[in-house]
Amino acid sequence: MWPYLLVFLITFLCATVDLFKVKNKWIVGAFLMFTLISFAIFRDGLGGFDYEMYTSFYSCIVPIDDYWAGKYVPDYHYAHKTMEWGFTIFCTLVKTVDPTKGPVFMFAIVGIFSMVLLYKSIKLYTPFVFIAFLFYLYKAYFWHDFTLMRQCVSISLFVWAIQYIKSRQMWYYFVFVTFACLFHMSSIVLFPLYFFVHKRFSDVTVIAVVVLAVLLMLTNLMPKLAQLVAGAAGMADRLQVYMGGGKSVNPLNFLEIVVMLTFMMYCRPQLEQKESYFNIYLNLFVISAFIMLAFSSIDIFTRIKEFFVCAYMIQVSYLIGHIYSFKVRTVIFLTVALYCLLGYVRYLFVFDAGGLLPYKCVLW
């Protein structure tokens, strides 16, 4: 347990820097990235079923010359999963320069690329980047960086592309989302966001969307509708693979949505003036909330909502960082940090039935 607690402590100490005006924050950022990246890439067998899947997949990958010579089986399947060709080509390129020919090198390339790109992206959208990463450590770090390797790359590409929604550079946005699709096809749902996420919707509209999501959750309407459509299309059996067994929304997630949305609506007039990306991330937050609530019983949608974890990170950093009173800001920060610690520790015991414990490292 102590390695996990040490990582949280380092992230917490880095986040405290955002409470003050400190020069040379890049040093703190470099140290934080080194810690989070190293902890992820040097894990040994930690990450559930996906870790084994990617390890087996990479063992079948051949260098690029052999790939073009036809020595790789392009329809390779592992547990009925076919990897996107973009990820496959990426792995062949990595295997070409990999001196170890083992999975750790591939994990390192993926980890460095996705984490550094995510960090550089978050810096574009908030001046309180370390507070954002403290919340990320609790909300998504293990799931994204230990498990969702392909989607983790896609998520980083999407977060970087959000700047082009703001600047209304459609083709730049589409290019990055296309690359995201080459790593994880679920990214295809991101294309339409360009056309409405930048807009300012009224408070009534924002709240109405979330209330509608709650009603859909309580009536379990979306799973019923999905089953009806799938049945008519002769795909009822296939749909069952993606159903969540009737599971409901985690009460902590529901509480987070309610509390954060309440504060965002209350602080909206001030934050809109201070942060140009506020409404974009408010809209992304609402989309995430809608998916989480209305589609809670359909597992495939839980992967889609992962693209919008960035909205939680950014909004939490805004809500804390822009509190005028230093004393109040410190108290709220410590409260949120405690909440993150409890959620962080809980995840260690819950994920894969405690499969993350104890931490195992390939270096020893």
Image (cartoon, helix red, strand yellow):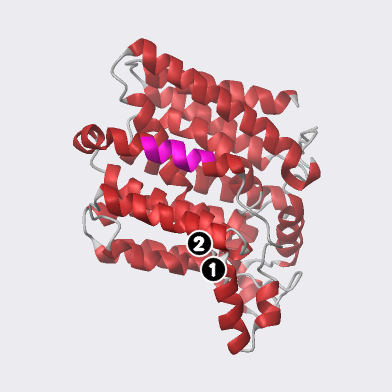
Residue beneath label 1, please?
A: 222
**Residue neighbourhood size for the residue with mark 2, other residues' Cα within 10 Å, grouped as few (<14), some (14–19), many (≥20):** some
Residue type at mark 2?
A: Leu
Residue 239 visible, this angle: yes
What secondary structure is the stretch in magenta mostly built from? helix
* Residue that carries the numbered disc 2 in the rendered image: 216
Horizontal side of residue 28 vs 341, given as left or right: left
The residues colored magenta run 255-262
Q: Is residue 304 visible?
A: no
Residue type of the residue flagged with mark 1: Met
Check if mark 1's residue and mark 2's residue have beta carbons within 8 Å. Answer: yes
Name the residue: 34% across, 46% down.
Answer: 282
Viewer-nearest residue: 213 or 215: 215
Q: Secondary structure at mark 2?
A: helix
Q: Quadrant of residue 71?
A: bottom right
Q: CA distance from mark 1 to mark 2?
A: 7 Å
In the image, residue 134 sits, relative to residue 221, either above or below, namely: above
